[in-house]
Amino acid sequence: MQAKLFSLIWVVEIKYGPEIVKPLLDAIDAGGHDWRFVIVISLIQESLTELKAQRPSVDAYWPSYLKEQPDGSFRPSIVEIIVATESLQLKGLAANREEAFLLNWFQL
């Protein structure tokens, strides 16, 4: 039995700035994809902001890397991460140190 194309989950990574969001949404819409089976991820917070502004219902994730500062603290801070995920209404995030090889996803 062969899986139907539209029953697959599509994971789309935005690697460009917010200017790519509208053409990306138009292309996915033109393909007739069911948005319930589309997940969008991006390291670029501005792109996620634009995505959620244009299509709030899209499941979006932020793979954010924690960068250790000279004083031993990490950026973004936990407060910055919480504020960003709440304000963008993200479905989840991954927060790892920059040398981590695997992403640990957290469902929100």
Image: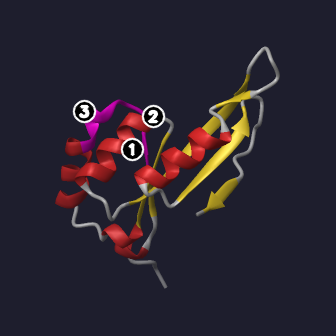
The magenta-colored residue range is: 12-21
Q: Which residue is mark 1?
A: 48
* Residue type for callout 3: Glu
Which of disc 3 and disc 1 is earlier in sequence? 3
Q: Secondary structure at mark 3?
A: helix
Type of amino acid at the residue the image marks with label 1: Leu
Judge depth for marks 1 and 3 and give the one in front.
Answer: 1
Question: Helix or strand or loop: what does disc 2 sit on?
Answer: loop
Disc 1 and disc 3 in contact, CB within 8 angstroms: no
Task: Look at 34% across and 30% down and name the residue there.
Answer: 17
- Rendered-image quadrant of the C terminus: bottom right
Residue beneath the point at 17% across and 58% down: 30
Q: Nearer the viewer, residue 82 or 90?
A: 82
Name the residue beneath numbered marker 3.
19
Cα separation between marks 2 and 3? 12 Å
Q: Which residue is mark 2?
A: 44
User: Quick check: 69 above or below 64?
Assistant: above
Q: Residue 15: percent from the left, percent from the top?
A: 42, 34
The secondary element bearing badge 1 is classed as helix
Where residue 3 appears, as percent x and y from the top left, is: 45, 78
Extreme bottom residue here? 1
Say what amino acid the circle numbered 2 marks. Answer: Ile
| Left or right of residue 46, residue 73 in this image | right
| Residue 63: percent from left, percent from top | 58, 43
Pointer 3 local density, CA inside 10 Å: few below 14, some 14–19, many at least 20: few
